[in-house]
Image (tube, rainbow, N blue to C red):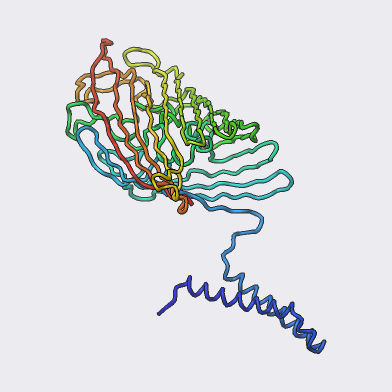
Amino acid sequence: MTESPRATGGRRLGTTARHLALATLLCTSGVGAIAHQSKAADLGSDCCADLEERVAELEATTVRKGNKKVSVTFYGKVNKAVLFWDDGAIEDVYVVDSSYESTRFGILGSAKIGGDWSAGFRLEVEDRVAASQRVSQFDAGNVEGPSLRTRWSSMYLNNLRWGELRWGTTATPKYDITKDTNVFVPNLLDTTSSDNRMNQNFRLRPKGFNDAADLSTLTWSSISRCYSSAESFNCSTRRAGVAYWSPKWQGFGASLGWFQNDIWGAALRYKKDWGQNFEVGAGIGYEDFHRRRSSGSASFDQFDEWAGMANIKHKPTGLFVYSDFSFSAPSDTSARGIFTKKSPPDLSAWDVWVGIQRKMPRLGLDSLGDTAFWGGFANTHDGIGGVPLNGLLPAGTFANVPVNTQITGADVDRWFLALGQSIDSAAMQLYAVYQHLDAEVDLIDKELKHVPAPLDDFDLFYTGAIIYF
């Protein structure tokens, strides 16, 4: 029977190691004490030659990195879930890659320059097959063609005293300010967060209209998002630019960055233990957009956005409270309502969670790792960044609205319950989450009269696992 490369390679390495050990023993033993001096010299010469040969053979069978000056780390996570959804008339089950923290892998490199100075890089790629943020009533997310996307491609120069300069495709200072796992209980924000990442591309369903053809052209994200992205809380992202990150001082860290298309932002983060019993984290970030709009663009290009979070955890009991907020204010002078002639409204959103995360010996789960149970409520007010600049919704956008209207606002409420179980021995997190969403839209006709457009609620349940490596 033919042996596998792993088996034959392991045997070859084992034989080489034994020969190497024997050669070393002969070279360093007192063999010369019982032999003639000249013969001992010859033996030593033959021994060392054999030793060099064996070392070369061992090196030839060993996987090595490019050089000894750069330390390289390979890392990533795999996050897959089964999603059950119900839009009020249709229900189905999908297998998805969770967009709360997508499946990804990357390489970190670091090199010591001297003194307090070092340099390095980060390269990261994301797998987007059946990404939950892309699935809908008509699309289970099985993309054709390449599904990989570059998330990070950046370098840095670091000084322990003065901080770090990053350039390339890298995080903006405001990025992840509302879901920064560095200032929150581990793993839970990989399971769920304030944004609607499991249903944001599902279409809204007018109440009482149950056919597929009755679905609106607008999605849940259309009425619950910032003006800069498809999210309502974590609205910033990774961009091509330059950013500075300060060293930590008394738990505080600051960052400032400029990015292509004339976008700049700043943030302040805080994490510190208060005594032996409390872990506290907080953050606030700002981003300014004044980029030029390309010809025919339908997006807002002048706006300001704020976001932040705060949490506190009682370490002895594992009880915690978490809250975050988001504001998005358009200032584009060309954006005026088709009927009102007024600027679009500012988005405001808030979210609060309460829960417990600790080992549960009474449930017999303490040998696995921490068990977590938590729940929360979120509201996104006037998050209409996914509609046209003038707010015009043609007749039939909603099956229960037969006239042209202008959308002037919206409210989306979401509450959820979640359960998580860490399996420390496998660097794994199991989870199960239920969410319920309901929405209202504010519409007016050309006479500025209110036009009712009731919508069905949306329910979803997903369960899955994350493995970290």
Quarter holding residue 434:
top left
Image check: 250 left or right of 326?
Answer: right
Quarter holding residue 454:
top left
Q: Nearer the viewer, residue 30 or 100?
A: 30
Q: Is residue 285 visible?
A: yes
> Where does the image place residue 214, in percent across and percent down from the top left?
19, 30
Q: Is residue 127 visible?
A: no
Q: Nearer the viewer, residue 373 or 70?
A: 373
> Where does the image place residue 297, in percent across and percent down from the top left?
40, 28
Q: How many numbered badges does the structure rendering display?
A: 0
Q: Nearer the viewer, residue 106 or 196?
A: 196
Figure check: 439 above or below 466:
above
Residue shown at 78%/87% (left/top)? 34
> Where does the image place residue 198, in percent across and percent down from the top left?
34, 38
Residue shown at 57%/70% (left/top)? 61
> Where does the image place residue 326, in percent across and percent down from the top left?
45, 25
Residue shown at 47%/50% (left/top)? 424
For this orientation, the residue located farthest to the front is 362
Quadrant in which the N terminus is drawn: bottom left
Residue shown at 27%/38% (left/top)? 85
Figure check: 467 above or below 233:
below
Image check: 353 left or right of 48?
Answer: left
Figure check: 140 above or below 326:
below
Q: Nearer the viewer, residue 256 or 51?
A: 51
Image check: 281 left or right of 89?
Answer: right
For this orientation, the residue located farthest to the right is 37
Figure check: 422 above or below 193:
below
